[in-house]
Image: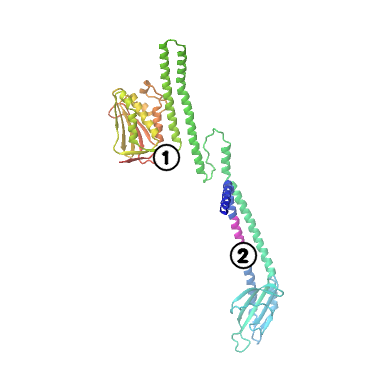
Amino acid sequence: MSGRLSGAAHGAIRGRWQALSLKARLLCSIVPIVVVGSMVDIWSSTLLLRQQAQEAYDRALAGVVRVIDLNISTESGGLALAQPYQLLEMFELTATGNVFYRVATEDGLADIGFATMPTPQTLPPSGVLHFYDAAYLDGEEVRVAMLIRPMDPPLLAGGADQRVIVQVAESLSERDRYTSRMVWRSVGRDAVVLLLLVAALLLGVFVAFRPLQRLQREMTHRDEDDLRPISRQGIPEEVVPLVDAINGHIARFTQHAHMQRQFLDDASHQLRTPLATLRTGVDYALRESDPQELRAALLAMRSGLDRAERVTNQMLSLAKVHDASLTVPTQSAERFELGALLEECVRLMLPAAKAKRLDYGLEVPDNKVQMRGMRLLLQEAILNLLDNAIKYTPARGTVIARLDIRQGQVCVIVEDSGPGMSEIDIQQAGVRFRRGAAGKANNGAGLGLAIVGAIVRAHQGEMRLMSPVRTNGLLVELVFFLGLKNAFCTVLVRD
């Protein structure tokens, strides 16, 4: 139960975190680190300041101890201290509290000053200045500096081990108050710096996000048909890839919208004439009572319907190719053998070739060409080439389809012995609705080569048209590149 509750709480926290804006996430991540780091710095500075103040006061105590030690004399046979009160008066001018002193022998037989000065349980070694805290005179906290050294000369004969103890103490009340004031001044200064740092951080975050806010305003106030790319001027370097990706998406959408408008314009242009002809034919047939004339009118209407159907199908094919080139290609890509596809297309067009008694053939190498792409579209491209070749080749002519493997290339070739195309027609081949000189005598919409070119470009290939070297006619090559790895196709030759 507790595990489920903790999991639910964790999920709620994660959901709240994900709901925060990017600025809020950044501030929630950085501000606590800055605050904690500053607090640690203030704490360490406070400790260092107290330590430095303690060392400064201790150095003053040590100086008094050294001066008193220099004024101790045992030459008269007793323990004497020259002018101790004048020394203490000089020290009290710089001290912050009450001052006490004591000079005594280690055995306590001779004692000068405040005889009840506290001593540590373990005396320090000779010559070492020792500091410690103690309570003195009704529990007043004092800081004591102690120095123990051998007595020279000793007070007693044979007393080489005799030592003299020098102690100077200062009350801590004023010292603590003074140190606390210094510490609080430092803490206040550091706190102001922390507040300024947090304010600067907040201001920096808001200023840094201004380009994103400008980008948001620009995109919000844009018209629906405004497809201009987003300007990269003033955009932070980290946001440039996002802007480039958005611009790329806008460019693809612009291209898609342009093709849609183009498709609608072409459809209205190409279908207007057949529909008008059909309407005229229908009106004529309704007025005609002669069965022969009525049949002739119906045949003419059927011819117009055939042309409208062909134009519509070709335009839909062209739109499908353009749409496939803009969408994610891996959704429709498949692996297939290119030679088998070419053989299948040749077999499908065999009845049309037999009807014209053509020398109709296929040449495929022994090597297998595995291709990854859009099989149905490539089939439509090859069928378009074969259909054009059969249509324009005179009876008893030649149409050959073959697959060639060259240096770094795989080519699907369709060669015919028809009338061919002029250099101008070859240069303008693939332009929508444009037909060459030989095609004007046949039915068609001028979209076949445009469809083939679009399909090949969608597979990162090239369509090339040329006149055959040995005969008249036309030779069309669909060139794909070996080892090309992209989202559309991968061509690999296998034995």
Q: Specify the segment rendered in magenta.
A: 34-47
Residue marked by disc 1: 487
Amino acid type at circle 1 is Ala
Look at the numbered disc 1 and give the secondary structure of its residue: loop
Q: What secondary structure characterizes most of the magenta part?
A: helix
Q: From what the image shows, is residue 410 above or below residue 191? A: above
Look at the numbered disc 2 and give the secondary structure of its residue: helix
Residue 451 lies, in percent from the top left, at 40, 30
Residue at (44% x, 34% y) in the render: 324
247 sits to left or right of 483:
right
Residue 403 lies, in percent from the top left, at 31, 34
Pointer 2 or 1: first along the chain: 2
Give the camera-side residue of 213 and 307.
Answer: 307
Proximity of marks 2 and 1: CB atoms separated by less than 8 Å:
no
Q: Residue furthest top?
A: 290
- Quadrant in the picture for residue 127: bottom right
Q: From what the image shows, is residue 196 above or below residue 242? A: below
Q: From what the image shows, is residue 290 above or below residue 237? A: above
Q: Residue furthest front?
A: 1
Give the camera-side residue of 305 and 21.
Answer: 305
Q: Nearer the viewer, mark 2 or mark 1?
A: 1
Residue 47: mark: 2
Alpha-carbon distance for marks 2 and 1?
A: 65 Å
Residue 373 lies, in percent from the top left, at 39, 37
Residue 428 visible in the picture: no
Amino acid type at circle 2 is Leu
Q: Quadrant of the C terminus?
A: top left
